[in-house]
């Protein structure tokens, strides 16, 4: 029988190695470039990102919006927001006999008025009614991190709900996104295509 301190040490090393050794981000790198580039250009041109998740990943929406603009970070704040009632408003379509065009159109108009027609949805989750809203034709092309969305357009980051490392990958991908955005804002990373 192992002592707890020895077991914890080994378990921590194994957990650290999972993320480091997985290589999943390296495999995704070329697909990430056009997606990140499009979002960064949107922000640099005065646009905002509105974070929307499925219900299972609401914790992640909170994590993003509570950490992206901490005062302790010595950089400008980024226009990345969570509209707390947005998911509820979208979900209400299920409870009424509204057509998605009518219901989604009204929500989109509200967001356009709120963000001067210069917002982009950052959707993270499964293809639920919230994902359908993000893909609604009147909504500006979203930044999609789709879980179990193998049949979706190529302009998405695809993840699997069966992956034991899903939460870790979401956090790792977010950290990469934030670091890259900082690099772009401070002129350390160019968005020019080769």
Image (cartoon, helix red, strand yellow):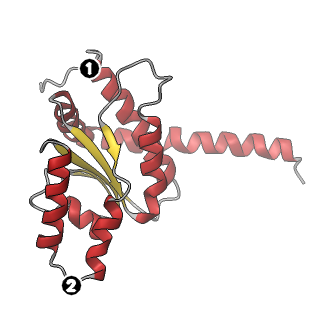
Q: Is residue 57 above or below residue 182?
A: below
Identify the residue at image location x=27%, y=22%. Answer: 184
Observer-side mark, 2 or 1, equals 2
- Residue 34 % position (x, y): 18, 38
In the rendered view, does 158 fall on the left or right side of 40? right
- Residue 125 % position (x, y): 36, 60
Q: Is residue 33 above or below residue 134?
A: above
Asked whether residue 147 is in view, the answer is no
- Residue 5 % position (x, y): 84, 42
- Classify mark 2: helix, strand or loop: loop
Camera-side residue: 180 or 69?
Answer: 69
Quadrant holding the C terminus: top left
- Classify mark 1: helix, strand or loop: loop
Identify the residue at image location x=19%, y=36%. Answer: 47
Q: Residues within 10 Å of mark 2 (few under 14, many from 20)?
A: few
Who comes first in sequence, dot 2 or dot 1? 2
In the rendered view, does 143 fall on the left or right side of 164? left
Q: Is residue 117 above or below residue 105?
A: above
Give the quarter of the image for residue 103. Answer: bottom left
Q: How many marks?
A: 2
In the rendered view, does 32 fall on the left or right side of 135? right
Q: Residues within 10 Å of mark 1 (few under 14, many from 20)?
A: few
Camera-side residue: 166 or 111?
Answer: 111
Q: Is residue 194 above or below residue 17?
A: above
Camera-side residue: 21 or 147?
Answer: 147
Identify the residue at image location x=80%, y=46%. Answer: 7
- Mark 1 = which residue? 189
Camera-side residue: 47 or 38?
Answer: 47
- Mark 2 = which residue? 97
Q: Residue furthest top?
A: 187
- Residue 48 % position (x, y): 23, 39
Asked whether residue 32 is in view, the answer is yes
């Amino acid at each position: 029988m192992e002592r707890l301190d020895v077991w914890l040490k080994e378990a921590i090393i194994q957990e650290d190695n999972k993320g480091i050794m997985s290589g999943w981000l390296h495999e995704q790198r070329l697909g990430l470039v056009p997606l990140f580039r499009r979002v960064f250009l949107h922000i640099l041109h005065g646009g905002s990102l509105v974070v929307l998740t499925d219900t299972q990943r609401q914790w992640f929406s909170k994590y993003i919006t509570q950490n992206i603009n901490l005062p302790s970070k010595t950089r400008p704040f980024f226009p990345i927001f969570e509209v707390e009632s947005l998911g509820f408003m979208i979900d209400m379509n299920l409870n009424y006999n509204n057509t998605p065009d009518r219901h989604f159109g009204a929500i989109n108009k509200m967001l356009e008025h709120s963000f001067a027609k210069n917002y982009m949805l950052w959707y993270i989750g499964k293809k639920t009614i919230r994902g359908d809203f993000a893909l609604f034709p009147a909504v500006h092309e979203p930044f999609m991190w789709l879980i179990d969305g193998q049949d979706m357009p190529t302009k998405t980051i695809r993840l699997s709900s069966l992956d034991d490392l899903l939460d870790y990958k979401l956090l790792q991908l977010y950290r990469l996104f934030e670091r890259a955005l900082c690099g772009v804002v401070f002129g350390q990373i160019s968005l020019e295509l080769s």
